[in-house]
Amino acid sequence: MNNEQIFEKVNGVFRTIFKDDTILVTRETTAKDIAGWDSITHLDIITGMEEAFQVEITGFEVMNLNNVGDLLDLLAQKMSE
Amino acid sequence: MVFQSWFYFLFLLGLSGAQIFLLPTQRWILLLLGSFFFYSLTGWQPTILLLFTIIITFGSALWLGNEKNQGRRYKILLLSVTAQILLLSAFKYLGFFNDLVSGISHWMQSPSWVQLPLLMLPLGISFYTFQSMGYVFDVYYNIRKPERHFGHYALFVSFFPQIQSGPIGRSKEMLPQWKSITLPQWEMIRMALLLFLWGVLKKFVIADRLGIYVDEVYDSPQQFSGAVWMLILFLYTIQLYADFSAYSDMAIASAQVLGIRIPENFLFPYKANNITDFWRRWHLSLSGWLRDYIYTPLLFAKKKWKKWAVVYAIAVTFIICGIWHGPKMTFVLFGIVQAILLIFEMQTKEWRARLSNQLPSWMYQSLSVAITFVAISLCFILFRAEGLQQVKEIFIQLSQWEYSSVIDYVREKNGSIIIGLLFFLGLFLFYDEKISSVIRNQKENPKKLGLYLSFMVVVILIGMVIGKEQFIYFQF
């Protein structure tokens, strides 16, 4: 899976969780940019990514995510392992 | 040394003036010496303890930085956090242990089998312990590299505007500032002065005045009816905010005069429209700390539990929040009640969203703010009461409602003063956000600011004549 495909899939997870087909995240997107992105939704996003990419994201890794770019890099790294 | 004293003001101005003679890269030395002088006024034993905390957290972070094995890193983190919690407990929670032992002994109808000697509570220990612990967490989670400059790190933990009652600083925001300290421009100093005065005004004129009425009712709870109690609960809610936000404003202003930025601690908490919102506005440096270092790790450690992970993380986080405030069952209960309210809000989120669509938005918003304020005022009984017995007494009084008793109370207390005070409080809550934005606006018209400044000085002088008290949050 290349970076573009990862990005498409990640954006799809965001659209499903926020029930909004117009969402278009960027590498710089953070919780402040999307209304309703609280800690509970954050949990849904992480578990949504785990299911979509069939990977496991640890609590330690979550602590280092500052924006969507960090999440994309983490997923890309996990997919290549 | 309290902020609202001439000695502190001269100390702050002296340090600020002396900074001019040093290079930006050397100014941290002066601030460190000033901070240790400031703290040493509380005694040499607390100063040694502060130094000890600085050494163990500085050392454990360096150790974490040098260790690559994740299992061993976790053990180092545990060791460091345990050492800090033990230190904090030794000074803050022995009384809690004694109470627990006495309670169990009383229940078993036997004499207490052990009573530990109590140690004096070092000033700001809860605040600097969390600040330094947060730094160790940051290094553990690779959020930042360990600080290798001992002086910079010692200043991060001991910085005098923050050490007594926060705001609890974060390493990634604070530590880089010591490398080169730029002196503030005149606009910044003017803003800081205004913010400091605004803090003094909130403390002397609002918090301390309200304290007189609140203390009297709390001293003899059974003499007042439910309606008077409700009035007093509202007054205490405002007193606590005025008192603690006054301290925070003075801390932020003091740091600004020295060219240092420290985080804001409040975001107009009584405009919150639910308890979740309240915790995004109240004591931000503590709630942010708890969110990042307790709630989030717990939530993601148990993420397979889905919604129950949230319930678990909220419950543990808020019990810790309660205990952090002090060694009393009332604080533990405060944490538990907050957790229950937050979980309730989580469960009713969709129902509330539907309700908000059915009511006019102004009505839903006003009702939400009012209900939240009442709920917070009731919760703060646990903050102010001496113990669970008094909490029970207050709730019994609250159930005996007599509207006329409020009128009698106001009459008895010199009605015009109380009505004037309530009017002033209304203005304060209504214009809090506006005043705050004017004070923080560096481009504000200097003449207008001069007018505000003069007004504040006059009001403060009037407040000073009537008397002064300690900051409530110093006890934590």
Image (cartoon, coloured by chain):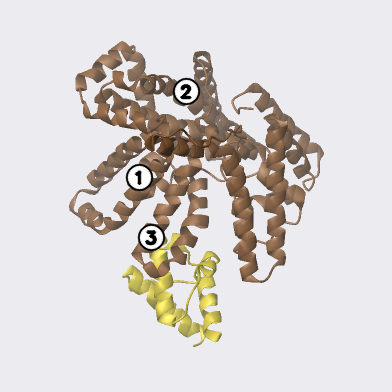
Q: Earlier in the sequence, mark 2 or mark 1?
A: 2
Q: Give the spatial CA distance, label 2 vs label 1.
A: 28 Å
Q: Amino acid at mark 2?
A: Asp
Residue at disc 1, secondary structure: helix
Q: Residue under circle 1?
A: B337
Determine whether, in the image, residue B282 is placed left or right of residue B181.
left
Q: Residue furthest left?
A: B358
Q: Are marks 2 and 3 on the same chain?
A: yes
In this view, the residue in front, A28 or B41, is: B41
Q: Residue under circle 2?
A: B208
Q: Are marks 2 and 1 on the same chain?
A: yes
Q: Position of residue B233 (x, y in %)?
A: 34, 29
How crowded pointer 3 is (Cα within 10 Å; few <14, some 14-19, many 20+) is rated as: many
* Image point (49%, 38%), residue name: B96
Task: State which chain is coloured brown.
Answer: B
Q: Earlier in the sequence, mark 1 or mark 3?
A: 3
Q: Position of residue B435 (x, y in %)?
A: 46, 34
Dots 2 and 1: beta carbons under 8 Å?
no
* Image point (30%, 11%), residue name: B412
Task: State which chain is coloured yellow.
Answer: A
Whether residue B326 can be seen here? no
